[in-house]
Image: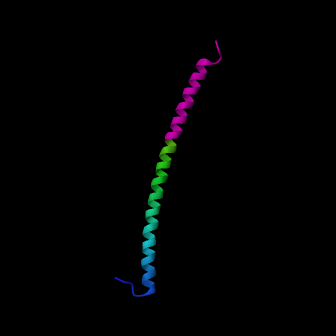
């Protein structure tokens, strides 16, 4: 089916672009969600390590 007028062609192109933009935003949202999960996991790991280092420091300092 071939569009008969330039207005129809523009409408078809706009519809295709809209679909591509929606797909791109969905992919971007997925990547952002993954980045946020990794950031939260990293922050948790850092907090755990800071607690462990603080516990080691309390056990070592001041030296007996």
Residue 20, placed above or below residue 9: above
58 sits left or right of 18 in the view: right
Expressed as whole percent of the image width and height from the top left, the position of residue 58 reads: 60, 21
Main secondary-structure element of the magenta-colored stretch = helix
Give the tally of numbered discs: 0
The colouring scheme, among rainbow, by chain, secondary structure or one colour, is: rainbow
- The x, y position of residue 19, in whole percent, is 42, 68
Q: Residue furthest right?
A: 62
Q: Residue furthest bottom?
A: 5
The percent coordinates of residue 42 (x first, y second) are: 52, 40
- Highlighted range, magenta: 41-64
Q: Residue at x 61, y 18 (%)?
A: 60
Q: Position of residue 34 (x, y in %)?
A: 46, 49
Q: State the residue at coordinates (58%, 18%).
A: 59
Residue 43 within the segment the image draws in magenta: yes
**Quadrant in which the N terminus is drawn:** bottom left
Height in image: 47 above or below 11? above
Q: Which residue sits furthest front?
A: 2
Residue, far left = 1
């Amino acid at each position: 089916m071939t569009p008969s007028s330039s207005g129809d062609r523009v409408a078809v192109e706009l519809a295709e672009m809209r679909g591509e933009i929606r797909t791109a935003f969905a992919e971007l949202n997925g990547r952002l969600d993954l980045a946020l999960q990794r950031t939260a996991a990293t922050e948790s790991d850092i907090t755990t390590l800071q607690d462990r280092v603080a516990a080691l420091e309390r056990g070592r300092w001041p030296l007996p």
